[in-house]
Amino acid sequence: MFDVASNLKSVLHNLPEGVRLVAISKYHPAEYIEAAYNAGQRIFGESHEQELQKKVEILPKDIEWHFIGHLQTNKVKYIAPYISMIESCDSFKLMREINKQAQKNNRVIDVLLELHIADEETKYGFTLDACRQFLQQGEWRQLANVRIRGLMMMASNTDNQKQIAGEFDTAARFFDEVKENFFKDDDAFSERSWGMSHDYTIAVAHGSTMVRVGTAIFGPRVY
Ligand SMILES: *Cc1c(COP(=O)(O)O)cnc(C)c1O
């Protein structure tokens, strides 16, 4: 096993106060998560519903699970009883289903709106214009069992650090705009989830409050 505890420590060392770490454990076995858990980590992120389900059953109950992958509406019901945050909310249809399942479970589920800023076609998420329209349209205000906590995005998969920083800045400015226009009096709208293994140090310099780091903690994934 990768030295999970020492990697975790190095990553945490690079995070300024107020920035939280979501340890992305997808494709890694439960023992790796346990190693990080025993080193004090409590927030973990997964991107597949079935894999998450299996891990939830065998791992400690005080883990906060974040869902970070593309979520099909018909899968929401499986994770709704326990998920702490769905970071990858990318449509009103999905949000409505999250609300419905949250209601059934008598809880409020935190979500982030996933933005598409990177110059890659395959990534999910709202474009900035689509996100503006969605918020303007206002139907989300009726969803009493969903709480929008902020924004999530991925930067382009490139070595060009300037481009990456520019994309984080775009997201940070968009956060300010949306905060001002729609969430001014809502303290819960406060999270900016950006930064992964190769770019999280750039992300924290550009407004991130939550980084999602997998490889730098657990090593390369075996698919
Ligand atoms: C896999 C994944 C990560 C973590 O990526 P690493 O490069 O392993 O740190 C972060 N965010 C999302 C949305 C992911 O799918």
Image (tube, helix red, strand yellow):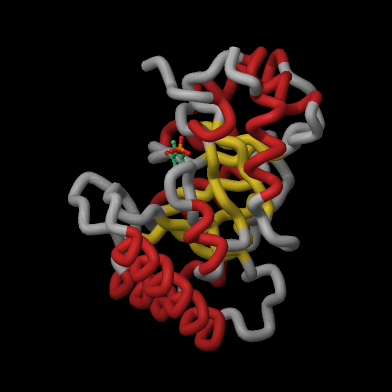
Q: 36 or 193, which is in the foreground?
A: 36
- Asked whether residue 180 is in view, the answer is yes
The residue shown at (66%, 54%) is 15
Q: For residue 92, say whether it is visible.
A: no
Q: Nearer the viewer, residue 31 or 69?
A: 31
Query: Residue 198: image x %, image y %?
Result: 43, 45
Quadrant into which the C terminus falls: top left
Please say if 13 is above or below 186.
Answer: above
Task: Spot the residue most to the left.
Answer: 121
Residue 29, by quadrant, is: top right
Residue beneath the point at 50% across and 24% down: 219
Question: Residue drawn 46% across and 49% down?
Answer: 88
Task: Give the tally of numbered discs.
Answer: 0
**Residue 134 spot, x, y in % from top left:** 38, 71
Viewer-side residue, 126 vs 144: 126
Which residue occupies 64% across, 35% down? 44
- Whether residue 124 is situated above or below residue 130 in the rendered picture: above
Q: Is residue 127 left or right of residue 65?
A: left
> In the rendering, at what x and y percent does residue 218 appear?
56, 25
Image quadrant of ligand 1 equals: top left
| Most foreground residue, 141 or 30 | 30
For the N terminus, the image quarter is top right
Against 179, residue 112 (above or below) is above
